[in-house]
């Protein structure tokens, strides 16, 4: 009976292969099993030369075989590690030879990262809705920050990078480090108080909040709400320089300016020494030109004034007077000459008349003029000449002496 | 218009010296100055530009760090830092 009933139970006897194939089809036909995330701790990790990865993930109650083919494994350098808590994605299948169902993994990440990412997105949405990312909240950076605050770990490579850039570009600055952990449980509180102490005690012109790259978990402090709010509340503008270029954190969104790396944060916040040298040279040229212009105008003014002055100077007045005098003198001379000529002409006429009526003409007719030689008086009467008086007799062509005879 | 007596350039920070240099040049370029003013402004500008250049060439980054202090909360301390 028992044997019969046993026989009757199955009207079909499976081959192992058939049953296994059937199970495989069942598993692979369930869409819920074809796209799963499973979390657990890694054990029995094996990396054969093929490049595929075999491991088990387990929790306190169960375990699950996993395999990741080489092509997917290459995209996850450093993962997984023995004992590490992981989140693994893939589909459930069945390895028929071993009769083993397993997870064919195509992605994996450290456990908690998914939650972190969800939390990241929630916080980002929250702060964004509060307007903390608005462009008009972003403050301009000073052209020349005299005091630069740095918030980072004193041991970090990020600090070395920042100091290197600042020394090269803008050694005029004074740099104050507010040291704090940037990773781990104490990092958020440390960063918040570093920002506060800088703002209170140093009053920097700009604050660089920097750290090197890392996993989402490493950067947790930069996705922390209290840190984000402290950055938003900072009196000094904040430049974030967190991680490598592909990493974005909440702090990057809140900061006044986001730089892709710590070095880039230092560069963005400072002018370049070479540009400053150029600026000075430019001002020197401009002031040289301005003075040259002023000198040229002054010379022009002087020339204009000098010519005005020339016309107004006493010398010019004298010269004028002299010229007028010359004029007058010339005119006077001409007038006088004209008058003289007239007079001369009149005189010549008179002289002729005179000559015609004068003694010369009479003498020429034979008359003589007798004068007393001593007095020169003309003898007009016999009474004038006594015996023996010397006389001068003038005839028309000359004179000769004579003496009065005995009367 | 009379300005306060110009500061000794040696007392000026880079930013002050550069700022005054910019003012000087702007005033010089405005052209409404007499020649004597222009000349003395120009000389002042030269002094300021020299100061800027000197500061830039001689500057060494000053590094400090904030250290917790019982009395004042925090004090600044020099930070030794070799690259």
Image (cartoon, rainbow, N blue to C red):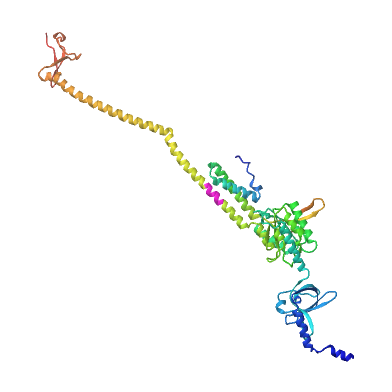
Instruction: Please state which of residues A15 and B64 is positioned toward the viewer in this rendering.
Output: A15
Q: Is residue A149 above or below residue A364?
A: below
Please identify the residue farthest to the right as the structure is shown: A1
Task: Report the label total.
Answer: 0
Residue A31, percent from left and from top: 74, 76
At horizontal 53% and vertical 41% (from top left) the residue drawn is: B34
Q: Is residue A387 left or right of residue A314?
A: left
| Above or below, comparing residue A156 to residue A67 in the picture | above
Stretch in magenta: A284-291
Observer able to see residue A194: yes
Name of the residue lying farthest toward the left = A366
Q: Quadrant of residue A314?
A: top left
In this view, the residue in front, A14 or A308, is A14
Dividing the picture into quarters, in which one does residue A125 lie? Answer: bottom right
Assign the magenta stretch its main secondary structure. helix
Foreground pick, A349 / A129: A129
> Could one spot residue A179 in this view of the protein?
no
- Residue A232 rendering spot, x and y as whole percentages: 72, 56
Left or right of B3 on screen, residue A85: right
Q: Quadrant of the C terminus of chain A?
A: top left
Asked whether residue A269 is drawn in magenta, I would say no
Q: Is residue A38 left or right of residue A5?
A: left
Question: Left or right: where does residue A252 sit relative to residue A8?
Answer: left
Residue A365 locus on image (x, y percent): 10, 19
């Amino acid at each position: 009976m028992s044997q019969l009933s046993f026989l009757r139970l199955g009207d079909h006897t499976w081959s192992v292969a058939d049953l296994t194939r059937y199970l495989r089809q069942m598993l692979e036909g369930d869409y819920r099993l074809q796209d799963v995330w499973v979390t657990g701790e890694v054990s029995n990790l094996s990396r054969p030369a093929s490049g595929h990865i075999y491991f088990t993930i387990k929790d306190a109650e169960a375990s699950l075989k996993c395999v990741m083919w080489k092509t997917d494994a290459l995209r996850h350098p450093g993962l997984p590690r023995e004992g590490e808590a992981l989140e693994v994605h893939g589909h459930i299948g069945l390895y028929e030879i071993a009769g083993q169902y397993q997870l064919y993994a195509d992605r994996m990440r450290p456990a908690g990262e998914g939650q972190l990412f969800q939390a990241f997105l929630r916080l980002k949405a929250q702060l964004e809705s509060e307007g903390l990312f608005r462009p008009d909240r972003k403050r301009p950076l000073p052209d020349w920050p005299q005091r630069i605050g740095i918030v980072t770990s004193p041991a970090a490579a990020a600090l070395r990078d920042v100091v290197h850039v600042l020394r090269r570009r803008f050694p005029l600055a004074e740099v104050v480090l507010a040291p704090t952990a940037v990773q781990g449980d104490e990092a958020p509180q440390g960063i918040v108080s570093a920002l506060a102490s800088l703002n209170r005690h140093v009053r920097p012109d700009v604050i660089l909040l920097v750290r090197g790259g890392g996993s989402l978990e490493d950067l947790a402090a930069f996705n922390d709400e209290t840190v984000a709010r402290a950055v938003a509340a900072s009196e000094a503008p904040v430049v974030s320089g967190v991680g490598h270029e592909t990493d974005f954190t909440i702090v990057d969104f809140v900061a006044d300016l986001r730089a892709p790396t710590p070095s880039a944060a230092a560069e963005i916040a400072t002018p370049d020494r070479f540009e400053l040298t150029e600026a000075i040279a430019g001002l020197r040229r401009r002031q040289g030109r301005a003075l040259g212009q002023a000198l040229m105008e002054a010379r022009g003014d002087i020339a204009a004034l000098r010519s005005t002055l020339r016309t107004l100077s006493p010398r010019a007045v004298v010269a004028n007077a002299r010229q007028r005098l010359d004029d007058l003198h010339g005119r006077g001379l001409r007038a006088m000459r004209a008058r003289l000529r007239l007079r001369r002409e009149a005189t010549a006429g008179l002289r002729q008349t005179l000559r015609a009526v004068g003694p010369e003409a009479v003498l020429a007719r034979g008359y003589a003029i007798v004068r007393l030689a001593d007095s020169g008086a003309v003898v007009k009467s016999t009474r004038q000449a006594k015996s023996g008086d010397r006389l001068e007799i003038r005839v028309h062509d000359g004179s000769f002496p004579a003496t009065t005879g005995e009367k | 218009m009379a300005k306060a007596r110009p500061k000794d350039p040696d007392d000026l920070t880079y930013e002050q010296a550069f700022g005054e240099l910019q003012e000087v040049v702007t005033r010089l370029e405005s052209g409404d100055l007499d020649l004597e003013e222009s000349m003395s402004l120009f000389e002042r500008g030269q002094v300021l530009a020299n100061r800027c250049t000197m500061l830039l060439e001689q500057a060494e980054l000053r590094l400090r760090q904030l250290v917790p202090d019982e009395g004042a909360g925090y004090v600044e301390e020099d930070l030794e830092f070799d690259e």
